[in-house]
Amino acid sequence: MGEAETLEIPITKVQWGLRGAQIFFAFLSMCCIAAEIAWDNKVLTNMGSSIFANLHLFIIVLSMFAAAICVAVPFVYLNYGKLQSAYRAFRLPRIEFVHTAIWSILILIVSIALSVELGFRTCDPTSPHWFSDKINATAFRNETTFINGLAGNCRTARAGLAFGWFALGAWLASLAVVGKEWYDGRRQPLPKHDQHRDEITMNTNSSRSSFEPAGTQPQYQEQVQMQNITSQPYSQPYSQPYSQPYSQPYSQQVSYSTPQATHTPMSGVLSQHASPIMTPQGMPLPEPQPMPTGPTGPGVGFPQPQHYPPPQG
């Protein structure tokens, strides 16, 4: 029971009212159609009752139990702790939607069939239709029961059909309510816009396609990186093993060629500081600068400190 208190009833008050209307109108339709079938079986000895009336009665009776299940299962579970599996199933909107749609379609089919059958039936007791060999109502030709009962039977059958249509309307209204609840439950809220996160994503994944996995790198980037490594002009001095000494001593200065102006890859402007061209003898070394030995130009002079005798007292 502790778990049942935390769960919500799967249907609203509107649904409770609609389920009650389905049961009520189905009960009235059942009573009317049952009376009409009983009269037909009594009078129409050869033909009997209509097959559409019997089918309509069968579906209407079952629809009462189908509507009662939607009401009884939550009530029994929340009050007695029973029918837990059925309760959890009916808590899903799609299951209740399919359940309601199936019974709505069945009631619609039998209601249309009975409407067509009653539309072709005549309610005139003097019509030759009732005294044919196929129907054989001759025994009740002059009886007051047949004459007065035929008109009443027609009205009863039409009333039962009308109550069946009202029950169908309640089922369709319940279907609309369940469908709306299902649609509202499936709608997911849109993610909030985060400008800082968008900027990070644009800066970090600007060269990555949205169709590529997050943990992979494109193949063309690896090819470009390998080409840059193999095409660098500085890779030749490093081809020698580390165990071999360099042929160029550190004390000897390395001659540099005149730097040439090159285009920078980002700005496209001529750069006045080009990289020095390496000589095949060894690695470039910085030119030693002489250490300054003293002031080489005019500066600020300070006088020599002088000692004065103490004043005589």
Image (cartoon, helix red, strand yellow):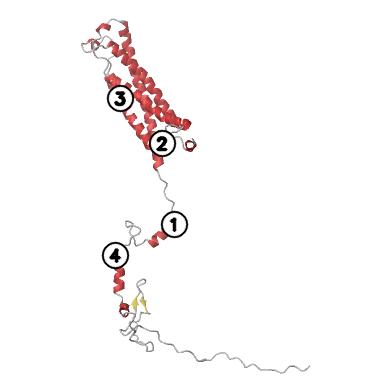
Q: Residue at x 44, y 57 (%)?
A: 195
Cα–Cα gap, marks 1 and 2:
42 Å
Kind of element beneath mark 1: helix
Q: Which one is in front in this view, the residue at disc 1 or the one at disc 2?
A: 2
Residue ID for mark 4: 220
Mark 3, other Cα within 10 Å: few <14 / some 14–19 / many ≥20:
many
The numbered mark, 4 or 3, whose residue comes first in the sequence reads: 3
Q: Which one is in front in this view, the residue at disc 2 or the one at disc 4?
A: 2
Q: Which mark is residue 110?
A: 3
Tag 2 near tag 4, CB within 8 Å: no
Kind of element beneath mark 3: helix
Cα–Cα gap, marks 1 and 3:
59 Å
Mark 4, other Cα within 10 Å: few <14 / some 14–19 / many ≥20:
few
Mark 2, other Cα within 10 Å: few <14 / some 14–19 / many ≥20:
some
The numbered mark, 1 or 3, whose residue comes first in the sequence reads: 3
Q: Amino acid at mark 2?
A: Arg
The numbered mark, 2 or 4, whose residue comes first in the sequence reads: 2
Q: Which one is in front in this view, the residue at disc 4 or the one at disc 3?
A: 4
The numbered mark, 1 or 4, whose residue comes first in the sequence reads: 1
Residue ID for mark 1: 195
Q: Which mark is residue 88?
A: 2
Q: Which one is in front in this view, the residue at disc 1 or the one at disc 4?
A: 4
Q: Position of residue 306 (x, y in %)?
A: 66, 94
Q: Which one is in front in this view, the residue at disc 1 or the one at disc 3?
A: 3
Q: Amino acid at mark 3?
A: Val
Q: Which mark is residue 213?
A: none
Kind of element beneath mark 4: helix
